[in-house]
Amino acid sequence: MSESFAEEHWQQLAELRRCPVGRTDLYGGLWILARYDDVLNAARDWQTYSSSDGSSPVPLQTGGSVKLMPISTDPPFQRDLRKLIDRHFGARLMPAAEPATRAIALELFAAFEGRGECEFMTEFALKFPAYSFFNYAFGVPPQTSTAVMGWLDDILAAPHRAAESVQAFFGWTRSLLDERRHGEPRDDVLSSLLTGTVEGRELTDDERGMVLMNLVIGGVDTTALAIGNIVHHLATAPDLRRRLDEDRSLIPAAVEEFLRFEPPNSLRGRSVTCPVDVNGVHLAPRDRVVLAYGAANRDPDKYESPDELVIDRFTAPVPAHMTFGAGPHRCPGSHFARMEIAVATNLVLDRLQDLELAIEEVTYTAGLTRGPRSLPVTFSPPS
């Protein structure tokens, strides 16, 4: 959670990988798994490493009383709830969702591309995933996301305003659900939450609100930071940009490598349910464990030259990166995020020629997610 961790992110994760199991006494005591195999095994083993006390690295009782669903639940409840969500985010559905997503991106580009400069995070990266996700998942005007994301920023980063913002967020979800109940049915996430059942019963509106909060937090901020990370590389590595521009077939593999190299959400939390030994270290029931996905992504036992960005790495068989997690809590919106990132990458290559960073050094957000705080860039406008 510290500024120093944001600044020395990869050095500290590399140090943790050298430990059998990392340890800090902060937040009541946390064990940290940083090696690929340890992280993967724990992510898959929900019976031993439970999410029911929250999936944030910071324990639920420390971070507040809002329990996100389904990420802070375990099967079978979690499995039934995921079925309602997953049916809307399968890979086969993404080609149909791409045109509307691209249209939103183009509208945002039109607001700044003629100037030859922009602050890319605020003018595009933070807006685009919010607008496209709200449109696709909830069928609401994209601009609705502005107020909602402001409340969530307060909930996550400004505890003194959190109570008021939680109330505002759940007021919005109740209105949204009531509007859908009395409006035209749609085949989207909102309708599935209203009509579907979990363990043989309907969800309460409070539970539906928890699901919507989980989806918005997971589906917007991390994608925005991932896009910011990619554009930072495109603006500072001309050879990389040139290679992608000349061979667009590399973009799907490049997206995977960008996500491996700089995951926007590199830490998740679990609670131990039964005695377990990891690399000779004994973990006891109720111990809190952090899964360091970012560290696993750069494990030299799994990836050759893991600290190098190799954009065609995923054109060959290599272990899947851990950025979207693994096991029952693997990110439900991973295919949608990949599609958004590919759309944004193609548009940057198409429309922002001679792209350069307008500051000497990028600083990174501290806390539960990681990406550029600000990304001012210059470019040649489209002719």
Image: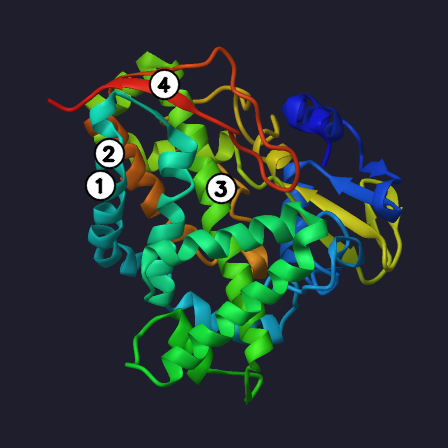
Instruction: Give the CA separation, mark 1 to mark 4.
Output: 19 Å
Q: Quadrant of residue 179?
A: bottom left
Query: Whole-percent x and y of residue 214?
Result: 55, 60
- Counting residues from the N terminus, which is met first, the one under dot 2 or under dot 1? 1
Residue 73, quarter of picture: bottom right
Pointers 2 and 4 in contact (CB under 8 A)? no
- The answer to whether mark 3 and mark 4 are in CB contact below 8 A is no
Residue 198: image x %, image y %?
54, 81
Residue where numbered disc 2 is placed: 347
Residue 285 image point, x, y percent: 87, 59
- Does residue 342 appear in the picture of this structure? yes
Residue type at the position of mark 1? Leu
Callouts 1 and 4 close, C-beta under 8 Å = no
Coloring scheme of the render? rainbow
Determine the residue positioned at 50% across, 60% down: 215
Q: Answer few, some or many: residues within 10 Å of disc 1's Cα (few below 14, many 20 plus, some between 14 and 19).
A: some
State the separation of the CA atoms marked 3 and 1: 31 Å
Q: Amino acid at mark 3?
A: Ala
Which residue is most to the top? 360
Q: Nearer the viewer, mark 3 or mark 4?
A: 4
Secondary structure, mark 1, is helix
Task: Give the Cα separation between the discs numbered 2 and 4.
Answer: 14 Å
Residue at numbered disc 4: 235
Mark 2: amino acid: Leu
Q: CA distance from mark 3 to mark 2?
A: 26 Å
